[in-house]
Image: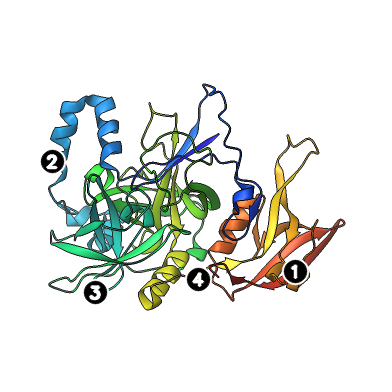
Amino acid sequence: MTKIEPEQSSLSRKNSYNNQFLFDPPVSLTPSKAKKKRVREKRLTFFTATSVALLGAIIGASVGSGAGVVAFNYLSRPAAIVVNDLENVNWATAASATAAPAVVTIRVAGDSQGGNGSGVVLSADGYILTNAHVVSINGTTENVRLSVRTNDGGVFSAKLVGADPTNDLAVVKIEPTKPLTPIVFTNSSMVNVGDQVVAIGAPLGLEATVTRGIVSALNRTIQVASSESPDQSSLEFWSGDAGRPINLSVIQTDAAINPGNSGGALVNDKGELIGVNVAIANAGSFGQAGNIGVGFAIPANVAQRIANEIMTTGEVSHGLLGALVSDAMSSEDGTGFSIGVTVVELTPEGAAKKAGILAGDVITTINGKAVTTASELTAAVRQEPAGAKVKIELIRDDVKMTFDVVLQEANQ
């Protein structure tokens, strides 16, 4: 069972959303709201992390409430990448020093709640990329006050330019007194498993924190709470009662990521952005909150495309396949592994139907990437803009077939 907690706050979601339309999921497909008896078991929890309430709970549970207060007084101080011995700089130091000037800390405040996250500088004149959940409180960006502290200690009020809850990304704008240092994007499609990486952000409010690791996996799909969910402070498992889950195709890393890292940078050994940190997995419901070496980042190519659209138009385009799909299981009783995605129903005049895809087809890849679950296919389609041509491979009556599909617009 999977619990998902968003970073700005903490809403949990059950990872069992198998039957999905590749557009906004209809109410009829929402899992049953009937309450089930809780079973004590070890759980894997995804959560992003910036909530003040969550931070207090983590620190308080670990070392007592008094330490939590002391920590917050300390966390308010700016930090910097310190290099004392230039003759013994390793790759992690060099990458961190290169990228750190482009990483900022973001504070968000509402009438009664607040939190912090991280962001990466997109332009010298003050555009900054972060997660949508970082700039949301209780499922909305209305009446939310934002401020940004840059790497050199400058503090500026910020305004929201636009947000994309579907991919959990947002752009904010500040008016800096001097040019900022933009992050350098790299082609995330060229990243390899095993590549060395550094995560930079403000975990638990500790600004300019650097952690190192490797790329653990690529094309991983996770479900996290939508930033549009009305209650993001609950640590209960998602049961379909609050909002909806979103599916993200992400880079997995073992670089330590904790509450407050959301929206920060995951960079390669040259200090170039390969992903925007978004979530971590957590073993245990409450007792083991924090990093366990399983973190996730939105690929840089996706983040850059969405950021450019927000800065240009204030909106984001999402691809639409137009098919109701479900997991194809390796055994008839449903106890096996999911081995593909079965097309259950097609939307009239939808992209899939126009391309020649039929109900009963089992989709196995999209753009050369394997898809074994409905969530993976949904995430892959939603990362593409409307009008994008995707190559879909499928099996029909034991025969492999390939189709070029031009995606439609999901937002219409």
Q: Which mark is residue 345?
A: none
Question: Is 272 positioned to the left or the right of 249 in the image?
Answer: left
Give the x, y percent position of residue 307: 39, 69
Q: Which residue is mark 1?
A: 353
Q: Nearer the viewer, mark 3 or mark 4?
A: 4
Quick one: quadrant of the N terminus? top right
Distance from the alpha carbon under mark 1 to that under mark 3: 45 Å
Label 1 or label 3, whichever comes before in sequence order: 3
**Between discs 2 and 3, the one toward the N terminus:** 2
Identity, as a three-letter code, of the amino acid under mark 1 = Lys
- Circle 3 residue: 124
Q: Earlier in the sequence, mark 2 or mark 4?
A: 2
The extreme right residue here reads 397
Q: Earlier in the sequence, mark 3 or mark 4?
A: 3
Q: How many marks?
A: 4
Q: Amino acid under label 4?
A: Ser
Q: Residue 317 bears which disc, if any?
A: 4
- Rendered location of residue 17, percent (x, y): 60, 45
According to the picture, the residue beneath numbered tag 2 turns out to be: 74
Foreground mark, 1 or 3, reads 1
Q: Secondary structure at mark 4?
A: loop
Mark in the foreground, 1 or 2:
1
Tag 1: Cα neighbours inside 10 Å, few (<14), some, or many (≥20)? some
Secondary structure of residue under mark 2: helix
Towards the viewer: 266 or 246 = 246
Amino acid type of the residue tagged 2 in the rendering: Tyr
Disc 3 to disc 4, C-alpha distance? 25 Å
Determine the residue positioned at 46% across, 59% down.
167
Q: Position of residue 236 (x, y in %)?
A: 44, 33
